[in-house]
Amino acid sequence: MDNEAIRQKSLSKAKRLGYPVNSHLPLLGDIKIERSLEEFVDRMLCLYTCVACSYGLPKKIGWAWLAQEGLLEKVTTGESLYLREKDPDAGEKYKTHVETIWAMTWIASLQDELEFDKTCTNEMVSMFPNLKASASSEAFRSKCQLRELDEVVPKIDLAYCLHWAVGYESLNKAEIPKKPKRIRPYIIVNRRLALEWLVCDDPWDEVHLDT
């Protein structure tokens, strides 16, 4: 895989989207997919349940659904606290993870769009099991397939470059151009989290997102 060519495409895309670029950022090293399909889908479903609860699904229903699907051992400590009503303030954080889920649906080949000038679509919820109706995750799992590494790496590289850009702008209090219209910085960061977790062996809450 030609990481230099991938980087040049990332920088060109970043410029086209109106972001500053840094040609001296380190290239990505050797990357491989570190998660099995089962592990990836488990993580996506646990996070999706928290996101659903942050938008109004009763937490006891979310927790019961995870128990039904044998996923209670897969939730993080933070997710467990939130769903068991021990961290009520975490709801706002989980709302932002709707974009993490969108990136995960792309990685799992459930949909074909992960562009960094567009937010997720309203149709995303229809891709997932109906938690309120206690629907099984079996049919959902059967539709998931991890994308090939050569599809994923360019997205990781672009997310890395854009993450650096928004950090640079924030640090330098740079004036943000009105056009082209941008997605919010947290969307870049959360999508990058999903992509980076796929290719690392760190726990979900400890993924390194350095720029």
Image (cartoon, rainbow, N blue to C red):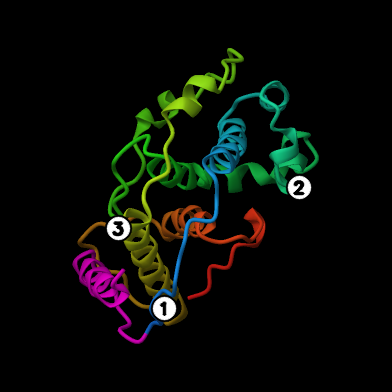
Q: Secondary structure at mark 2?
A: helix
Badge 3, how many Cα within 10 Å: few under 14, some, many 20+? Answer: some
Q: Which residue is mark 3?
A: 182
Which one is earlier in the sequence, the residue at label 1 or at label 2?
Answer: 2
Q: Which residue is mark 2?
A: 77
Three-letter amino acid code at disc 2? Thr
**Residue 168: which numbered mark, if any?**
1
Three-letter amino acid code at disc 3? Arg
**Could you say which is closer to the camera, residue 153 or residue 174?**
153
The correct choice, above or below, for 63 with respect to 26 in the image is above
User: Left or right of 171: which side holds 49?
Assistant: right
At which x and y percent is residue 18? 24, 68
The correct choice, above or below, for 125 with respect to 41 in the image is above
> Residue at point 42% right, 47% down?
103
Q: Secondary structure at mark 3?
A: loop
Circles 2 and 3, Cβ within 8 Å, touching? The answer is: no
Mark 2–mark 3 Cα distance, whole angstroms, equals 33 Å
At which x and y percent is residue 6? 27, 70
User: Left or right of 35: which side holds 26?
Assistant: left
Three-letter amino acid code at disc 1? Tyr
Magenta residues, as a range?
1-24
Total tally of numbered discs in the picture: 3
In what quadrant of the picture does the N terminus appear? Answer: bottom left
Q: Secondary structure at mark 1?
A: helix
Which image quadrant is residue 175 in? bottom left
At which x and y percent is residue 77? 76, 47
